Image (tube, rainbow, N blue to C red):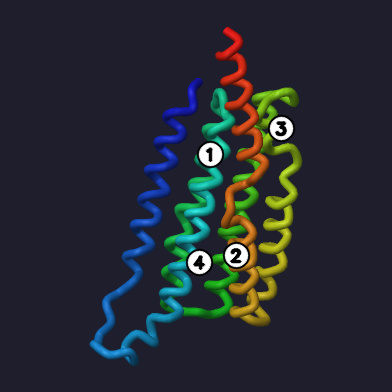
Amino acid sequence: MKKARLEAFSDGVIAVIITIMVLELKVPQGADWASLAPLAPVFLAYVLSFVFVGIYWNNHHHLLQVVEHVDGGILWANLHLLFWLSLIPFANGWIADHFATLPIALYGVILLCAGIAYYILERLLVRGHGRNSAMFKALGHDLKGQISVVVYAVAIPLAFVSAWLAFGLYAVVALMWLCPDPRVERTVAAWDAAERSKSAGE
């Protein structure tokens, strides 16, 4: 099965998620700087959520560059990831209204589950393509993904001590992932070079 439909569907779902999130940004009641102050937590939550969804879209796009085929298990793993991402607007809206312990903890649970879902998707893709594939060379053992899951697991109970500290740890994970995975970039570059060399030889 080719990857085109999976890629197109994923792009569409992620675009809708971002659109829903921006609706949480309400117009201020006044026309001065003071009227913007109550919107600060809303804006911070939106920025972090936008960055997280953007990171998943970016890395998902790079990941699919080395995908040659997909099967039913991979389709379901991708839907599993999209399910958790689709809950980010809900958690984001709750944080926007109540920057408190439980909303911040739930936000972390959703991020944790999304991180696990992405890791499962990677493992299924590696298994489906084999150890000699470009997919295996690109991913290998996803240390950064494993670290992210651990940080989320620490941040969730920490939210019951300090919501701001937990939120800060979520931001640290986002900073870790701002740049696409260099392993995929290197593998794609090597793959393209090999294809060009093969074409020149023919």
Q: Earlier in the sequence, mark 4 or mark 3?
A: 4
Residue at 53 percent of width and 50 percent of height: 56
In the picture of the structure, the residue carrying the numbered disc 4 is 48
In the picture of the structure, the residue carrying the numbered disc 3 is 137
| 7 vs 13: above or below | above
Horizontal and vertical percent position of residue 165 = 64, 78
On screen, residue 192 versus residue 136, left or right, reads left
Q: Earlier in the sequence, mark 1 or mark 4?
A: 4
Task: Label 2, secondary structure: give it.
Answer: helix
Label 3 crowd (10 A; few <14 / some 14-19 / many >=20) = some
In the picture of the structure, the residue carrying the numbered disc 2 is 108
Viewer-proximal residue among 185 and 14: 185
Q: Earlier in the sequence, mark 2 or mark 4?
A: 4
Q: Does the residue at mark 2 contact the one at mark 4 (Cβ under 8 Å)? A: no
Viewer-proximal residue among 179 and 15: 179
In the picture of the structure, the residue carrying the numbered disc 1 is 78
Of the numbered discs in the image, which one, if any, rests on residue 136? none
Gap between marks 1 and 4 measured at Cα:
22 Å
Gap between marks 2 and 1 measured at Cα:
20 Å
Label 4 crowd (10 A; few <14 / some 14-19 / many >=20) = some
Residue at 24 percent of width and 87 percent of height: 31
